[in-house]
Amino acid sequence: MKYVDAFRDPAAARALAGRIREAAAPLAGRSRPVQIMEVCGSHTMAIGRYGIRGLLPPHLRLISGPGCPVCVTDAGYIDAALELASRGVEICTFGDLINVPGSDTSLAAARSRGAAVTVCYSPLEAVERARRDPAREVVFLAVGFETTVAPVVSLVDRAAAEGLGNLSLLTAFKLVPPALEALAAAPDLAIDAFLCPAHVSAIIGADAYRPFAGRHRRPCVVAGFEPLDILYGIEGILRQLDAGEARVENQYSRVVTAAGNRRAQALIERLLRPVDAIWRGLGPVPASGLGLRPEFAAYDAENRHGLRVGPGRDAPGCRCGDVISGRLTPPECPLFGRRCTPASPVGPCMVSSEGSCAAWYKYGRIATERP
Amino acid sequence: MTTPDRILLAHGGGGRLTAALIADEIVPRFGAGPLASLPDAARLPGMAGGLVFTTDSYVVQPAVFPGGDIGALAVHGTVNDLAVSGAEPRWISLAMILEEGLPLATLRRVLDSIRAAADACGVAVATGDTKVVPHGQCDGLYINTAGLGEPIPGYRLSADAIRPGDAVLASGTLGDHGMAVLCARERLQVASGPVSDTGTIHRLVRAATPWAASVRFMRDPTRGGAAAVLNEIAGGRPFGIALREDALPFAPAARSVAETLGIDLLHVPSEGRMLAVVAPDAADAILAAWRALPEGAGSTRIGAVTAGPAGAVVMETLIGGRRLVDMPLGELLPRIC
């Protein structure tokens, strides 16, 4: 734990906060606040958990981005999983998805009515389930960014090696760089720079942001999840903005390399191909998802069970789409903290433990009442 | 999503949904008498000398975990509920629901640890019941214990007596029990992994008796962890609670696992710890008395009661930021006790 504690050092944090104020000072005269989007849900959580917003000058805004896989998953995907469960298929999933509302209900509610929904800590538990009862179809909900794609999609190799004919994936994998393109291109969003995700970048490599940074003239800094990592990342962004630069900087070089994890990339390349994907908040984004290659169609739950993931219906009044794209901060949503709370979430940003609404609700409801 | 019309696992988590279930379904039906303030143990009116009464059920899975088993837990949990109510534990009942096929060796081990724990706490098993259900209709064994205790003179515990400036004390590291059970259940291979803190705190209550008038409130942070207890204390009252992250006691093993899994240890149950809110001038004396006992060796001051923000638990983080410490929602760790 000593290693981690070094990145939470109080004296270093104070010094960095001072340097951030200094680097932000030349930008104070602009007509609008400096807006930095933290792309990843884990950044959003760390910013809340350590109270980082309170250390920043008032004209510097952190905007939570689309980097929570649960939040950007369309209601129609949950509807498809529920449809499978209603046909007697055992659904295996990471825990965050079970409370996400589909058009009408959630997997947690279906489970309490007897549907077979198993929360897994590791995708390998789905293999175990499939092995235990070969007569029963098992579907793993394959949701996530580049970080989790490789371990999840490797289930296909495992199933093939063991000759398991009853395990398939309902894929909704998403890719970060195409989402950044969509955000930077949106005319009504004034995002000055991006704090790029840590674990995603460990897979795709820091160089993956270069074409984007060059094309859109936005500083991109890859940062880790510890509080000092984030503060360093913010400082790096401000120095670039001060100097009028737009480069890719890798603050998290203890984990992230320029080229990324080649083995994971090769696995992804072999099993998956880019597909157009629908993002809650961004809508359809070309080539921003990954689907199984046609030769692995037997492991593709949509193909295997003859169903199509269609568009779902969001709950009336839900503004998660605007929150995900940075158009709204969570407390600006009329439902936030009233009709929509973690105990009774209306939208996915309140459900996911990495959702920006959940983070604001959990950690941030004191931000306006400083002592 | 509207209010669920079925029981969800999260209703048992000790968080918001549990509180809502009790407020909506239990209090309206049974809340007129001693149950009204939802104490860990109730002071029974009309009994000579006073009597304190509590009950708890135990469904922990696996039944044996590093640091203890369901038997020890079934004694400690109930004894601790009496103790934090300012009572000296005296008698417990023992009711067991056994699943057909349970190995007798497991039952013997559990009964032996019930006996050992009861002896160590100075309580006697006074009555009991055994039921067996067919295979598949319960998971191994479930235990219910009720406890009776005698009020210790001097304690007048009420969260309404808490004032700004009061100190918040913890009797040791927080969250070890939950992390130990989680690791055992998920078979997480952790070298020198977390060990449950299951144990009793009644001697800590006894040790604080000379300052009983200065003790405002005590509770053992079980389901929902310290965050749930502190939120219950502050919720709806005209004061807040301020914690300091650098003062929070966490065992290195529990912390490693929690960091890896992204779990906030403030939401994780302990089964042998106490949180107490005490008048500031008595805090050091109580801490010294606790530290003189093995079960209180890690006692420390974790925060203070503040004038505001009212109703909220706020933490000053390691790096000097501030954040809310919220009530956990629910389903983090089912079947932990």
Image: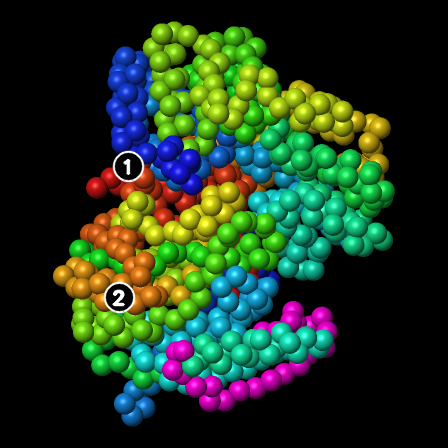
Say which of A270 and B201 sits in front. Answer: B201
Residue A184 screen position, x and y as percent: 51, 16
Q: Chain of mark 1?
A: B
Q: Is residue B133 magenta?
A: yes
Q: Marks 1 and 2: same chain?
A: yes
Q: From this viewpoint, which residue is outermost toward the bottom?
A: B48
The 10 Å Cα crowd at callout 1, few under 14, some 14 to 19, many 20 or more, is: many
- Find residue B292 and name its label: 2
Percent x, y of residue A139: 74, 44
The quadrant the C terminus of chain A occupies is: top left
Residue B182 showing in the rendered view: yes
Give left or right: position of A299 versus B324: right
Under mark 2, the amino acid is Ala
Quadrant in which residue A144 is drawn = top right
Please indicate whether residue A250 sits to the left or right of residue B159 in the image. right
Q: Quadrant of residue B226?
A: bottom left
Q: Position of residue A258 (x, y in %)?
A: 55, 16
Distance from label 1 to label 2 (Cα)?
A: 33 Å
Q: Quadrant of residue B135?
A: bottom right
Q: Which residues are magenta?
A: B120-144
**Residue type of the residue flagged with mark 1:** Gly
Give the residue displayed 67% in from the left and 52% down from the top.
Answer: A118
Per the rendering, the mark at residue B320 is 1
Which label lies toward us, 1 or 2?
2
Q: Residue at x 33, y 50 (%)?
A: B248
Q: Are dots 1 and 2 in contact, CB under 8 Å?
A: no
